[in-house]
Image (spheres, grey):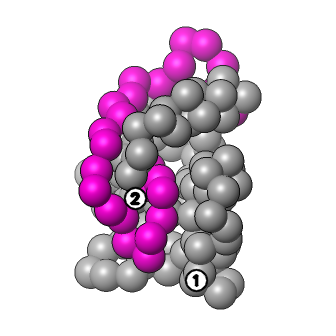
Amino acid sequence: MTKEYIHTDKAPSAIGAYSQAVKFNDVVYLSGQIPLDPEKMVLISDDINIQIKQVFTNLSNVLNAAGSSLGEIIKLNVYLTNLEHFSKVNEHMEKIFEKPYPARAAIGIKELPKGALIEIDAIARSK
């Protein structure tokens, strides 16, 4: 059994005591991603659609560094500061994933780091 800590400069650096992801055998456990620009470490926009797209880009880049991809995601946890954005998350997921979709939870919370509107963490298979 092997454990590998994943890091890529193509996704935001950790803003706390955690790794971007940990790969254990054939499973990748991704820390939550918020819509930060990886170079500037600032929110890319106040628009929820742009934030959702950036979160999935960040997740994709971490997965690529782990030898995986968005298509290998098994489970997602979506955290939203406004559950009215839930339908927008579904719209993006329908473009990103093929049926059958990954398992998912969507949770409404009061606030997220840096004022983000969305955060997503995931579990994926490695290829």
**Residue type of the residue flagged with mark 2:** Gly
**Rendered location of residue 103, percent (x, y):** 40, 24
Q: Is residue 86 magenta?
A: no
Q: Which picture quadrant has residue 66?
A: bottom right
Q: Residue 84's x, y, as percent? A: 47, 35
Which is more toward the observer, 113 or 103?
113
Q: Which residues are magenta?
A: 96-121
Direction top: furthest residue: 100
Q: What residue sits 60% from the left and 34% below the top?
A: 88
Q: Which percent across, then down, holds residue 25?
A: 35, 47
Q: Residue 116: percent from the left, percent from the top?
A: 48, 65
Q: Earlier in the sequence, mark 1 or mark 2?
A: 2
Local packing at callout 1 (Cα closer than 10 Å; few below 14, some 14-19, many 20+) is: some
Marker disc for residue 32: 2
Type of amino acid at the residue the image marks with label 1: Met
What residue is at 59 percent from the left and 81 percent from the top?
Answer: 42
Front one among 105 and 27: 105
- What residue is disc 1 on? 41
Secondary structure beneath dot 2 equals: strand
Question: What kind of element bears circle 1?
Answer: loop
Query: What count of labels does the image hold?
Result: 2
Res 30 visible: no
